[in-house]
Every structure is written in structure tokens, then in C-alpha cells.
Amino acid sequence: MNSNLRKQWATAKTITAFVSAVLLASVCSVAAGEQQALVGNLQAGTGPMLNAQMAASLRGDMVTVTVDQGRYAIQAQGEAAPFASGALRYQGAVKVGPVKDGVFGEGRELTIAAAAGAGESFQVFPGLPFVFHRCILVNTGAVATVVNKVPLMDAVLELGKPADQLVALGTGGLKPLAQNAGSYAWMAVADPASRAGVVGGWLTHERGSGVVFTRIDGGRLNLEARLSMAACGLNRAKSVVSETFILVGLPMRDWVSKAGRRGGQAPGHQAAAHADRFTAPGMTTSMVAPVTPRPSPN
């Protein structure tokens, strides 16, 4: 095996271990109470409201989300530029305030409230480099409808390298971007030389399953997160919260070194530690089955 291939497999093994730990934290699914809280935040927040065309920032310990002119940008702490950016799904009033998650605890949330109660939100939590993203779908029609497919995030990735020097790892295996047909549930895009990259994954799977794709558009690398819902019925004037998608973009060694300076665990291990409280009897977070390649999503 040549040195370049060895680097690629080393990157793949590291990212796979991280993603497996993170996705075990999917127990923080959106309960009914949390859905109502999110809808309430979007519809009638108590904090100052701004328009999505105006700048607002959501700052965490390790990552910042900025909304301005109808777009979002996600930037890791200490980095000179965002690693992901894109157009907001909704336009409307913006509010930044506290949020509480049953697994990750107290955090901060940026919500965009559109017409009729629709909207989207970004969340960050102390000590975690992840951005949690989800949206609220509202049926504004006169009759009930069925929701099947939901495009949630379409982000331009900035990894500082041409696309032909990057690789993607997902449920279909490790591949150059030109051969990447998509992945179920999660995907990592990385530079084998530096191990810097972006990992995205669907954290919850209550009403549907998610897929992740990459594409080259006008020379720019995009990461798409789409949700396929199991024929979710939506009555007139009713709303439903989408599944939660998480995104992170830091070199793997930075997560470990930053955690070490704080005398704690790496963020991926923290997420797994949270999940361990909810595992079935006899099961631990170390019981992670190998990922078996599956047919490419359609």
C-alpha cells in the first residue's frame, strides 16, 4: 500500500471512530415537549428579534454561526474563515437565546421565524464543536398534506484544497469526491494530507431517515443533507419539527488537544459518554458495528 493510500485509510479510520461515537448520541431525539419548545421559540420569543437580512451571531466555545443577508456561515474557533456557508431555508425574524437539551444540557440557539410558524434553528453547546440544525415545516394549505422529502442543509464547504485532493467517507466506503454517490445517515469529507475535514450526520431518526451528498457546483464543493420522512401526515395549519442534522469542521487533532488543555475528554467522547447513560442493558458505547457499504441512495 503506497503512502498516499495509507494516509487516506488513516484518515478514514480516525473519522469513522469519531462519527460512530457521535452518532451514538442520537438518543437526544426530539421529544414532544422539545418540539413544542422549539415551535414556541420560533413563534413568540422573548428576546430581541432581528430580520434575517441583518447580522446576528450564535457563539459557542468552539464554533460560531453567523446569519447575515439571508445566509449563514459556520466558523470554528481560532480559524480565519468559515468552513461551511449557505442560504437559509427560511427568511424572517432572528432571535438568539438560551436552549436546554435533555442530553447536552444548557446551550444557545439561533432561530429564524418565518411566516405561519415555519422556520429553522441552529444550536451550540459548551465544550462541543458541533452545530445542531433543524427546521419546522408548516402546512399552510387548506387541506391535509403528506411530507416525504425535505432538503434541510446545502452548505458550501471551504477546506482550502481543490476537490480532487479531497476524499469522502460514508456508508458506501472511502472514495474520491468524483466517485462519491452519497451516503446514508452521515458523511465525512477530508484532506488526507492534513486530516482536516467536515463531518455531517443525522442525529435523530424519529420520523424519517437522512441522506448526505456532495456535489461540485461551479468549482465549489457542496454538502447536501436531505431528509426522507415516512409519509408524515401534516394537517391543515399544523407543524412538524424535522430531524436534527449536526455539522462539525475541525482537524481531529485539534479536538483532542483542546480537550486536553481543559483537562477533559475530546468532544466526540463526551457525546458518547452522554449516550452511554441510555444504552440497553449489556451494551456500551464501544459496541459499534462496522459500517457495511450499501447501495447509493437515489
Image (cartoon, helix red, strand yellow):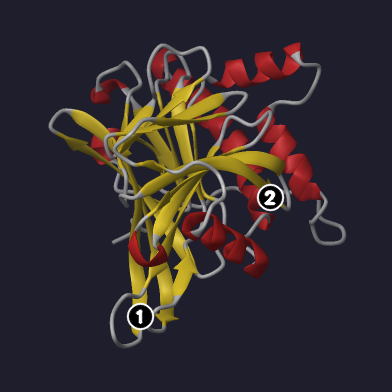
Q: Is residue 50 above or below residue 12?
A: below
Q: Position of residue 180 (x, y in %)?
A: 30, 42
The quarter in which the C terminus is drawn is bottom left
The residue located at (50%, 25%) in the rendering is 11
Q: Amino acid at mark 2?
A: Asp
Among all residues in the image, which is located at the extreme bottom?
143
Quadrant containing the N terminus in the rendered view: top left
Q: In the rendered view, would you say 16 is above or below 146?
A: above
Identity of the residue furthest to the left in this view: 218
Residue placed most toward the observer, 190 or 41: 41
Q: Which mark is residue 101?
A: 2
Tell me which label, 1 or 2, sits earlier in the chain: 2
Q: Secondary structure at mark 1?
A: strand
Q: Is residue 144 above or below residue 118?
A: below
Which labelled disc corresponds to residue 146? 1
Position of residue 192 in the picture relative to residue 180 (left or right): right
Camera-nearest residue between 124 and 40: 40
Residue 146, how many percent across, how many down?
Answer: 35, 80
Q: Amino acid at mark 1?
A: Val
Residue 219: horizontal and vertical position, in percent? 16, 28
Q: How dense is the environment of label 1, judged by Cα within 10 Å: few (below 14), some, or many (20 and up)? A: few
Instruction: Judge by depth and name the residue closer to the eye, 278 or 298.
Output: 278
Which mark is nearer the camera, 1 or 2?
Answer: 2
Q: Which mark is residue 131?
A: none
Q: Is residue 76 above or below residue 280?
A: above
